[in-house]
Amino acid sequence: MNNIEKIKKKKCMSYEDIAKETNVTAQYIFLLAKGQRKNPSLEVMKSIAHALDEKVEKVFQIN
């Protein structure tokens, strides 16, 4: 599970906005957000979290 969609909406961002700040495609971010892709690399998680200005643990629900 992840909170990409929830945080993205809260910050009025699009998948394209996140992709521009990462080295990850908007399509891949969309698939992660919808749970259709699992187990992203730590580097991808860090990059997305940074683009969302959140901690990795909050975005990807890591305990």
Image: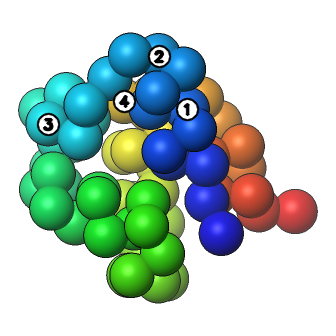
Tell me: residue 3, above or below residue 49. below
* Amino acid marked by disc 4: Ala
Mark 4 or mark 1, which is nearer the start of the sequence? Answer: 1
Q: Are the residues at dot 3 and dot 4 in contact (C-beta closer than 8 Å)? A: no
* Amino acid marked by disc 1: Ile
Q: Are the residues at dot 3 and dot 1 in contact (C-beta closer than 8 Å)? A: no
* Amino acid marked by disc 3: Glu
Q: How many marks?
A: 4
Residue highlighted by disc 1: 7
Residue in front for this viewpoint, 59 or 23: 59
Callout 1 secondary element: helix
Give x and y (percent) for residue 7. Answer: 55, 32
Closer to viewer: mark 4 or mark 2: 2
Which residue is painted at 25% across and 31% down in the image?
A: 14
Which residue is painted at 44% across and 60% down in the image?
A: 33
Residue highlighted by disc 4: 51
Label disc, if present, on residue 11 of the rendered structure: 2
Q: Are the residues at dot 1 and dot 4 in contact (C-beta closer than 8 Å)? A: no
